[in-house]
Amino acid sequence: MRKYWVDGTFILPAFVVFTVFLVIPVLSSFYYSLTDWNGLNPETHFVGLSNYFKLLTDQDVWNAIKNTFLIAICLTVGKNVLGLTLALGLQGTGRIHRILRVWYLIPVMLSALAIGYIWAYMYSPSDGVINTLLGMLHLDGLARDWLGQSDLAIYSIIFVSIWHFVGFTMIIYVAGLQSVPSEVYEAAYIDGAGRWSMFKNVTFPLIAPSFTVNMIVNMIVGIKIFDTIFVMTNGGPGTSTENLSILLYRQAFSFDRMGYASAIAVVMFMTILILSIVQITLLRKREVEY
Amino acid sequence: MKPFQRFKKTSMLSAMAALALTATACGGAGGAGGKTGTPAGKQNEPVTLKLYMANTSDMAIMPEVNRKFEEQNPGIKIDLQTAPVDQFETVIKTKLASGDAPDIFTIYAGTKKDSFVKAGYLMDLSDQPWVSRLTDGAKEVSSKDGKVYGLPNRQNVIGVIYNKKIFNNLGIAVPTNWDEFLAACQKIKDAGITPLGLGMKDQFVTQLVPYAMAPSAIYRNQPDFDKNMYAGKITFTGSPWEQMMKDYLELNEKGYFNKDPLGTSNDLVMQTMASEKIAMTVTLHGRIAALRTANANLELGMFPLPYVKAGEKIWVSSMPAIYGGIYAKTKHPAEAKKYFEFLASPEIAQTILKATNSFSVYKDVTAELDPALKDITEGLKVGSYAFLDSVWPNTVQPIMFQQIQNVFAGKKIAEMLTAMDKAFKDGAAQQ
């Protein structure tokens, strides 16, 4: 019994902070989503579920949902494929491997805002590094207005976001790979497994915990991504890069519809929660014990 | 399953929940906060006025002005904090809602301030001595229902800033109607120079051309246009906006703007303009100072965008800007009003106008303007109308930004106007 008290005392400070700064605001968001609060006026009216009904018929919301999922899926797939590839290539202990691992981790340490600004400059159509380089290589035909074309801007942002965070995904895979005992590989090698079948039947099943973490974390980050988009296009051109986070921000602070914005936040929360539970259930099943 | 495994699972679940929760935590920031009671103030202690201001063009001179005020009023200290313009509104709303209000804060002219008035956050300043000295336009944009809530301090103008050297070299005179303007653009383009700079990647830039067009195209002939919009008698659809947008787009189709305006930032346009590769840009007069800083040898001028047929009068888009308002429940109302009186005094008003190189908002103060502004000053006397969003419900402008970008990306003008009509209706109902 005493042990519980000790544990509890250690957890308490974190628990209090978490409650005050997260749980209470979250719960109040649920309440505000049922009101017409404009974010300013102290007086609010209870409007029941009308914000949620409005969501269903709002074209902007559907457009934002489409963009949110496009971004989330591309980020999750892109970062996992690239991150795993890098991890497999850099799992050794040689100096060059170690240097490169840190090298790929550097962008992760930079703020998303700084990265957004830098890339926005690089993407600039007339004096941007990217188009200038293409011009030098006589590939002018490939030069685009990367952030100014509605069909292209979202992929330009996805690329930057993958570049930004792929190192993090890689490091988690590296950790997973290093925890696989070498005996398993030796056994497989003796059994005459080739490189591909080694990966398919030994490595990949054994790094399943890393895969689970990377899938779920990247999906959540992908759904919530805000700062990179905010800096690079602010949802534009038009609404072509507007995801739920950007829409939520605009509803709350440009249109003074804090109640409606809270309803969008609640929808996001539910989406993330449900998807996370589904993913955890599915991915946990395929994790093997050894 | 080992115990450790179970621990891993629960910690994983709680980590996911925490990540998911942060999405919602950004939503609601506290409701109406408690108001702190007045502490028993000691005598002879200096009063500190807390200022929370958006970092607009007039902020550079303010520390100096505030120091002068403190010298003349030893009992009052000014604590000035500024925030970037795009973040300011978010923060001030949060501050007010959570009861952490400054004594004086930036408010924006026109309908943008109305929600603050409605929520009861602003003090009525109608009885202040400086009110009677305001120009009609300045008084109007600071008022709601006949009461004044803010102190205006300067007036901005949108027009065409142009490079005089390029115009002289090509023998182009300042255009006085739309055909002449198009001919000038063509001549500049033929000479291998970009006629017009447009950095639409920054959304606020999208509006500058239509804002400069609208006073001549709409308000000169239909002064009640906005009133009729509110009354639901007319819509953007079927109004001169259709032709305005067509002509705006035509400038792009003819190649008079820089390439790829949607991906080009306003900063880049300013840089290119400073290096004399762009002849003109439609923007706020305040940019002249920035262009001069970038290149001291620029010969600049500014004229009203001549969106008229030959012989018609050109009206200019012009707007008084408000310095700030006083928090309704401030503990130091007398000191705050004293500070505003000081700012409105002719000498200080002149100092601020000089520093921001802008037009006066007082009947008894004349600004000493940059010579580049001579043409546009004459134009102002002909007729002017406020920046459009200062009259619209605040829902319209952000939608307009997006929709103009859409039109430049190939969507239909009709779609844009429909969306703006809807935003107007929704916003008017919300007010």
Image (tube, grey):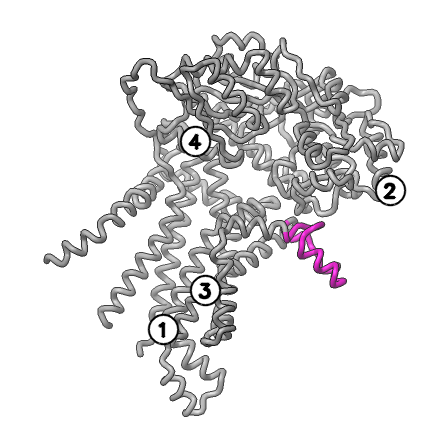
**Which chain is indicated by disc 4?**
B
Q: Earlier in the sequence, mark 3 or mark 1?
A: 3
Callout 4 and callout 3 share a chain: no
* Residue range highlighted in magenta: A122-147
The residue shown at (40%, 38%) is A50
Q: Is residue A23 visible in this depiction of the protein?
A: yes
Q: Is residue B239 visible in this depiction of the protein?
A: no
Between the residue at mark 4 and the residue at mark 3, the CA separation in whole angstroms equals 38 Å
Horizontal relation, residue B80 to residue B357: left or right: left
Q: Amino acid at mark 3?
A: Thr
Horizontal relation, residue B301 to residue A203: left or right: right
Question: Few, some or many C-alpha atoms within 10 Å of disc 4 (few <14, some 14-19, many ≥20)?
Answer: many
Residue B203, x across and y down, in percent: 61, 39
Question: Few, some or many C-alpha atoms within 10 Å of disc 1 (few <14, some 14-19, many ≥20)?
Answer: few
**Which chain is indicated by disc 3?**
A
Q: Amino acid at mark 2?
A: Asp
Q: Amino acid at mark 4?
A: Lys
Horizontal relation, residue B233 to residue A143: left or right: left
Depth check: give the residue in front, B367 or B122.
B367
Q: Which residue is mark 2?
A: B190
Nearer the camera: disc 3 or disc 1: 3
Nearer the camera: disc 1 or disc 4: 4
Q: Which residue is mark 4?
A: B93
The quadrant in which residue B12 appears is bottom left
Residue A147, x across and y down, in percent: 63, 50
Q: Which residue is mark 1?
A: A286
The residue shown at (47%, 56%) is A109
